[in-house]
Image (cartoon, rainbow, N blue to C red):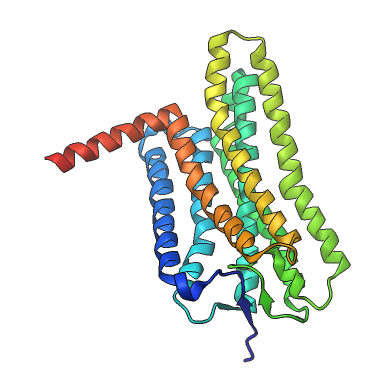
């Protein structure tokens, strides 16, 4: 069976710094796994965190782990390899999973925004609306919808002929379209549909819900406004963080031939590190209930270590 391989040409002096890159990225990956799973563990173990908001936070952190697992193991392998290559089929699979998980992030943030909107603007209806079944449906849709969208796009490109076999990147992303001999107008239109459905509409919904929340709380007393701000601020910080990630990714893809290797490499590393590391830090520190349990866990670990 003939296998087409693509060369990943985004690495910067990998022959000279391969072990340095490997150690840094391995430590980053371990830190991502430990920090995210620690917060997820706290949410699972403590019953007072078994609420829709914390369930969505746990899902978002699991999403960060999946996002990193799609990229980091292949990166670590490439740093130690003589040639940085990947089969075309594996590249398409990485593209599909990478963008599906990325799309899930926006939908999970939209689900969180809806949860906060119902909790603050319609508190009497909250138990009725945000039932266990509703939470499960929102979680399933958040993961399934992006996967279905991007699977169609990837399958559509799978049979198209390649005219270039060198990808300017350290992992497979939308830059793969620059390798195709010809692009399909139908797939380009469908790509815009994905952008609207998975990114633009959830973003507009998030902005609308938080606007309604701030309008509602503006009429309340200062203590209520402070409580709402403490609850919503972490979600907004994560949204800003992820929006920067998306902007970085789009910039890298759009400026494919106009951006230097150093700039592309630095922006790509920032993109795959900031969000997965930032989410557990933001929620672990800014969410009062999670921070309380995290502080207790750290104190308990210190006591056990000293004894």
Using the rendered view, name the quadrant where residue 288 is placed. Answer: top left
Using the rendered view, name the quadrant where residue 212 is placed. Answer: top right
Q: How many marks?
A: 0
Residue furthest toward the top? Answer: 221
Residue furthest toward the left? Answer: 307
Q: Position of residue 41 (x, y in %)?
A: 38, 44
Residue furthest toward the right? Answer: 185
**Which residue corresponds to the image point at 66% horizontal and 50% vertical from the top-left?**
246
Q: Position of residue 249 (x, y in %)?
A: 67, 55
Q: Nearer the viewer, residue 239 or 289?
A: 239
Q: Which quarter shows the N terminus? A: bottom right
In the image, taking residue 67 as reference, residue 21 lies left or right, namely left
**Which residue corresponds to the image point at 36% horizontal and 35% vertical from the top-left?**
46
Q: Nearer the viewer, residue 117 or 174?
A: 174
Residue 7 vertical placement versus 36 (above, below) = below
In the image, taking residue 13 as reference, residue 48 lies left or right, namely left
Q: Position of residue 90 (x, y in %)?
A: 60, 74
Q: Position of residue 50 (x, y in %)?
A: 44, 34
Residue furthest toward the bottom? Answer: 1
**Which residue corresponds to the image point at 57% horizontal and 39% vertical from the top-left?**
238
Q: Which quarter shows the C terminus? A: top left
**Which residue corresponds to the image point at 41% horizontal and 53% vertical from the top-left?**
33
Residue 6 vertical placement versus 98 (above, below) = below
Using the rendered view, name the quadrant where residue 126 is placed. Answer: top right
């Amino acid at each position: 069976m003939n296998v087409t391989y693509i060369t990943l040409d985004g690495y910067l002096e990998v022959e000279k710094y391969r072990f340095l890159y490997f150690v840094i990225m391995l430590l980053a990956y371990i830190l991502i796994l430990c920090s995210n799973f620690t917060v997820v563990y706290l949410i699972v173990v403590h019953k007072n965190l078994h609420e829709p908001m914390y369930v969505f936070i746990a899902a978002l952190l699991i999403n960060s782990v999946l996002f990193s697992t799609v990229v980091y193991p292949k990166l670590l392998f490439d740093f130690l390899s003589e040639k940085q290559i990947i089969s075309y089929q594996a590249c398409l699979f990485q593209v599909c999973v990478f963008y599906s998980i990325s799309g899930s992030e926006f939908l999970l943030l939209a689900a969180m925004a809806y949860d906060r909107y119902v909790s603050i603007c319609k508190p009497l209806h909250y138990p009725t609306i945000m039932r266990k079944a509703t939470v499960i449906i929102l979680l399933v849709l958040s993961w399934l919808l992006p996967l279905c969208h991007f699977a169609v796009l990837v399958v559509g490109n799978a049979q198209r002929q390649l005219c270039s076999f060198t990808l300017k990147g350290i992992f497979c992303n939308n830059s793969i379209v620059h390798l195709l001999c010809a692009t399909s107008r139908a797939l380009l239109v469908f790509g815009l549909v994905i952008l609207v459905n998975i990114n633009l509409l959830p973003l507009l919904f998030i902005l609308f819900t938080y606007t309604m929340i701030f309008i509602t709380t503006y009429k309340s007393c200062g203590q209520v406004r402070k409580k709402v701000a403490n609850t919503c601020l972490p979600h907004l910080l994560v949204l800003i963080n992820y929006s920067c990630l998306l902007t970085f990714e789009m910039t890298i893809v759009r400026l494919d031939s106009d951006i230097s290797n150093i700039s592309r490499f630095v922006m790509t590393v920032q993109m795959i590190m900031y969000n997965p590391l930032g989410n557990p830090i933001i929620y672990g520190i800014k969410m009062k209930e999670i921070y309380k349990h995290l502080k207790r866990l750290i104190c308990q670990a210190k006591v056990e270590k000293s004894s």
